[in-house]
Image: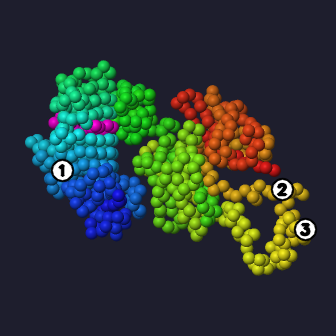
Amino acid sequence: MATYYVRTDGNDANTGLGSTTALAWRTVQKALGASGIGSGDTLYIAPGTYVENITVGGTYSATTSIIGDVRCNNFSGLTPGFVKISNYTNENTTPSNTANLLNATSKAYLSFDSIYFQSGGGANNNTINCVTCNNFTWTRCIFQQNINYAAVNGSSFYWTTTVSTASNLKVRKCIFAGHTYTPWITGANVADTFEMSDCLVMCGSSGTPLIRNIGGSIYNCTFFKCGISATQGNASYPLTVKNNLITDTSTGIAGGAWIVDDYNRLIGCQVNYSSVTQGANSKTSGTIGLSFGYETMLGFNPIMVLSPEESGPNVNSGTSSGAPITDIYGITWTSANPDVGIATYRNLSGIGAYLPTERNASTITIAPGSTSQSIELYLGATGLTTSTSGLSARYNRTRTASVSIPLVARTIAQAWTSGGFAEVDATNMPGVYRLDLPDAALAAGADDVTVVVRGASGTNGAVMTVKLSSGGLTSAQTASAVLDAVGSSYVTAGSIGYAIQNSNVASISGSTAAADELEGALLHNGTDYISAELVTPVTSAALVRMGPFEVKADGLGASDPLDIQKGAQHGVDIQCVDNNGAGIDITSATVTAKVYNSGATLVDTYSCTATYAADGRATFTIDTTVTNTPGTYTATITRTTGASDTQVFGPLRIYVRDI
């Protein structure tokens, strides 16, 4: 299984096996032609407009992926944008031709993701034209057919299945905009796993979706100015239609006994049901309940367009049984049950929808040449994994090109591996992830390294700058630089190295004058104490605050680390502040401090007592459960006023010193 690439400045004479101009193909037709990608391969298409009509010529027996790389995760130096396949050479003119945009006949196992299909078409021509096909998946695609005049037919999505063969067609998080019967999907009246979910369908009255002879499900779609026509089917292979919003059309749902209807809202339809039994939980009266951007226009908190209005009839009105886990934008339903339609209600400016900025400058220091190093990043969303769609990591060293970090699935306790990625603790440290840096990123020879993790839905990612400073030498590097140095290099009279060399001291425990001189230099106030600051290397995996909340401790005026002596019970005064340094009111809130060791294991939990609640000030006492063991600890402060109102402040670094 190989990976191939297409970009607008490539060449079809290339191998297609690299993402650079010198290696990538120029056209999608080359990639999907008979001499293009093979079964099970992956194709990445760079942003840009590909003016071409495509006929699929390859044969595929296993899932073969065609991915629009809109974020340029696999292409260096390009600007993110749409991956558009179009028959318009100029979007202000008529199409360059009127043929079907993408043709596939008797093909199977193709998976398309994040591609914009756009055509003007002509009489009886379609944007997508798949005939006798099966086992296709379409995700986050848009199908646009710009025909809109009398006596001309053309669908934005036309699909038929081989006789007596299950279609196994999956259409998820897609947008349809077309003229006649958009989409047109015909099955084979056999047991099927057809799925259409989280899709937006927009067309005129003549464009009513025609879905015939197919069993499966249509969940959480919004049909605007059109309904569902399933007038052919078989009750043995039912089509389940749930959680959909159908509005402003002549007939909402037309079909027969093969339609299972429930939890739908049909609003403003001249005829709600034609030969279909209305489900007990379906509604046919009331308002549409959609946001059209009016809240933003009035200066209220913005809501995603075409998502439910706040407290509107679509909120929490669906059923979770069989429904998709997330909405069209990849957001988990915010109510106990899914909302009706494509999107869940969410306030884009509220604290619950906070997305950390991509350019939040955060810095740590790691010694150059360090190996097997891990960092922690705040991504602001839980549940991310190496298989999360769009998630990617890259680094670049001072004034050099960026380098991809292939992510490898790990658990938080597993040993380092290059690209290792793991969620720290979704419950107690939500949004924090471990990333194992490749050794090459930290090699000597650069001033700093910038690490970026981004691309997944629900987070704008994180950026961390790693300063490669000799001030962060590890103990092994220190030993190599000092104790293993060639003796002849110590030539400065009066230095410790010179004295040791000329007295032939074999061990620091000796009683020679040179050994005494060295030993004395390491003593502190006459005691055999070596400063913890001298022997503790700079922590390479320091957790850097990247969220909106901060903890200030002991009146320091900043989130500085705390030093606590081993075995002490230590009162800690803290203040919970926002990103501007203003105190967060903790009146009537439950405030809890959780202390974790360097392995991200929870050591102890403390209840905080408010001292000046209106300004976010409180106190708690760390006891010997923590302080009996020297080391580096991390504390987070949780403020809770209810099940849906919880914020985590911090982290705050705590050093327990053995002095």
- Above or below, 260 against 81 in this view is above
Mark 2 sits on what residue? 529
Q: Which residues are magenta?
A: 193-211
**Number of the front mark, 3 or 2:** 3
Whole-percent x, y for residue 598 in the image:
65, 48
* Element carrying mark 3: loop
The answer to whether residue 181 shows anywhere in this view is yes
* Element carrying mark 1: strand
Give the residue at x 79% y 46%: 565
Which quarter of the figure is the N terminus placed in? bottom left
Give the residue at x 70% y 46%: 654
The tag earlier along the polypeptide, 3 or 2, is 3
| Amino acid type at image mark 2 | Tyr
Query: Around disc 1, counting alpha carbons within 10 Å, would you say few (fewer than 14), some (14 to 19), or many (20 or more)?
Result: some
Query: Around disc 3, counting alpha carbons within 10 Å, would you say few (fewer than 14), some (14 to 19), or many (20 or more)?
Result: few
In the visual, does 653 lie left or right of 532? left
The tag earlier along the polypeptide, 3 or 1, is 1
Mark 3 sits on what residue? 511
Work out which residue is located at the far left of the displayed protein and give it: 151
Q: CA distance from mark 2 to mark 1?
A: 80 Å
Number of residue marks: 3
Give the residue at x 62% y 53%: 541
In the visual, does 17 lie left or right of 526? left
Mark 1 sits on what residue? 105
